Amino acid sequence: MNAHPARRANARAALVLLVLATSAALSCGPRDPLERARRLQDGKGDFAGSLAPLREVLEERPDDPEANYRYGVALLGSGQGSLAKWSLHKALESPEWVERAGIPLATVAIQLGSYDEAVEVATRVLDKNPDNVEALIVRSDARVRTRREYEDALADADRALELDPENTGAMVPKVAALLGLGRTEEAGAELDALERAHSDENLGIHGSPALCTARATFAKEGRDNKAAEERFDKCLDAFPTDGTVVHEAVIFFDGIGRTDHSEEILKRALEKTPDAFGYRASLVDRYRKSGRESEAEALLRAATELESPASAAVGWSAIALYSIETGKFDEAARAFERARQLDPTNSTEILFGYADALVVAGRYDEALRIADQMKVPAHRSLVLGRVALERGDPAKALEHFTEGNRLWPNNAVARYYAATAAEQVGDFERAVEDYRYAMRIDARATDAYLRLARLQIAAGHPDLALMALQFSPGGRPDEEAGALLELELSARLDRAPAPSVLKRVPQQRRAGAAAALARGFSARLGPKAAVKFLRAQNDIDLTDPGNADALAALIEASAASGTPRTGLAAVEAALARHRDNAACHALHGDALAAAGSDAKTVRAAYQRALEIEPEQHRALAGLAGLEEKAGASESALALYDRAARADGADRVSPREAARLEAQLERRAEAEARLSALLREHPYDAQAAIALAELRRARGGGPDVTEELARRAVKFGGGPAAHELLERIQAERGSTAAVETRS
């Protein structure tokens, strides 16, 4: 069983989502817990201590706006920004709390990289009070960070300075906006003015991390990398743990190729603040991306030994998430159990994470028992929905997710699951809406952008798919897959790819990028254009097994263009140099088959590939087809199953296996295979047609059968889908309109 894509977000995103509550024991004081919280926050500045009494209030009055506001700022004050969002959003629903809750909510959205959300929230504050200087500054900052709204950011900063000319906080985003607009001289003048305004050391003049970072950024934007390096290093000497300084410095040094220095910056920040899980998560992410899994796990396990029980609980939660990502689901559940034992606050978030880990591990009854213990209704609804979805009841799951989203409207993962459930019941309009909502809340929490893009492609809307792929790039799950699909669509639509796209594809995957572009050219100009493009890529050595993606694309395009010998010659050149490479032998089998070689020769190529690599996907799929043609049905089914397991994105092998099961009169098995395929790939038109035909033949539910036929029409099933739908509608006397893929 594999973790769902929403649970396979990278370690950094997962850790940010589970920086957990670290409240102290219940304090002495007034009997009213809300009044105790007020005194702790307003009188003592004890945000961590106020968490426990605020939980008391929220258990009884979950919609209380003041309690939600104070709980949010308590989490923020305890360094737990990601958890603060939900409570602050709840407070924001009350008109009298819009201004107070809006500013911290927009601030934490910026910290978590949700810049569009920050703009939206700050705008709500400004709709209520257009002269709120703090909201103008926050919105200006967020607009700068989107890298799209420099003009509006400048207008906000200027308005803030008009209202409060001495507010130097507005000058930092103003400088950044001017830099973004290319108005370098004006930015320099403003920066000089900002420094002059702080020339009195008694006022904390040069002790501003924002000012220091602005100076370094100014040098960077002026392409004076040497000066920028010096300035960032000076900022780091002065403010080694400041979040803004560390973040901007890491971005800069990564950008100039000094990733080792970025890593040292993060290590130093973590050494000084070991409880800062953001730095720890960033390092874990780097270790994993560079193949240093053991170092990544060691860094996470070190957090379980932190002195604070609450911090150690966070560490165990991080281990649990890491275990989910690496497929160790039972270990994840045990790690959450340990986190619960250590956690002094009885955190609802740890309980929620534990239940989710049980769902991923397939321990559904245990997850339901944990759900019964939950005091947060939104958490309970989401767990019930997850269990229903995994048990194959998407309609029931959608009911639970809808209720959960009502209670917790700004949870990206919950919206994502609602979208997947909506897909499975055939409500694709709802799916599109929820995927978009999940992206707006937090583009980095799930692969919603990629799922939405694939849905739009299947529906015949490549332009909308491209918009989804271009939404808030960087740091999203499956970023490489998204970049490759974006390249393919850019070529297909005859649009120049964004300059940042290739940066999201590792250099060693240059062949993958070429293959993606070739597919796009083939769709727009025909397969001959793809062949011409691939043969012109002189910097890609097609005899190198590391470039197998490009070689596979050449074989496919040459076969489609009627010149299969071109692909065959290319793969034979690769084989001459790499006789022991499984991928080369598998591609050789494909090329031989396309060129019309006899089955014995093709089979030998696939079998040689499997001798070297027993789970080579292309060879398994190819050999399955040969076995079926030879009448060895059971052997073919086993090979189709192995191929599907070897590549989770393979839709052809499960579909072919289902077709073969139906031919063998094993219709129940065929239906089960097609149903499972459509759960993972809801817009597979051919699978929808096949399943509808099977259900219709046995007199299955007419509503479901018609939905499948409509789905097939929507997602490009062609004449067969239209004919099937017409037959079903004629039988039912139904003439309802259906959307056809353009």
Image: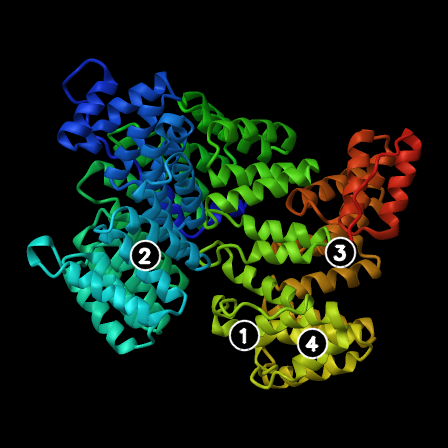
Q: Where is residue 65 shown, x and y percent of the image? A: 36, 24
Q: Would you name the residue on which mark 2 appears?
A: 173
Mark 3 in CB contact with mark 1 (< 8 angstroms): no
**Farthest residue, direction front:** 162
Q: Is residue 330 above or below residue 137?
A: above
Give whichever of discs 2 and 4 has the lower sequence position: 2
Q: Residue at x 61, y 74 (%)?
A: 514
Local crowd at mark 3 within 10 Å, few (<14), some, or many (≥20)? many
Q: Residue at x 59, y 81 (%)?
A: 578
Amino acid of disc 2: Pro
Q: Is residue 192 above or below residue 297?
A: below
Amino acid of disc 1: Arg
Amino acid of disc 3: Ala
Mark 1–mark 4 Cα distance, whole angstroms, equals 15 Å
Residue toward you, 581 or 356: 356
Q: Would you name the residue on which mark 3 appears?
A: 636
Q: Would you name the residue on which mark 1 appears?
A: 510
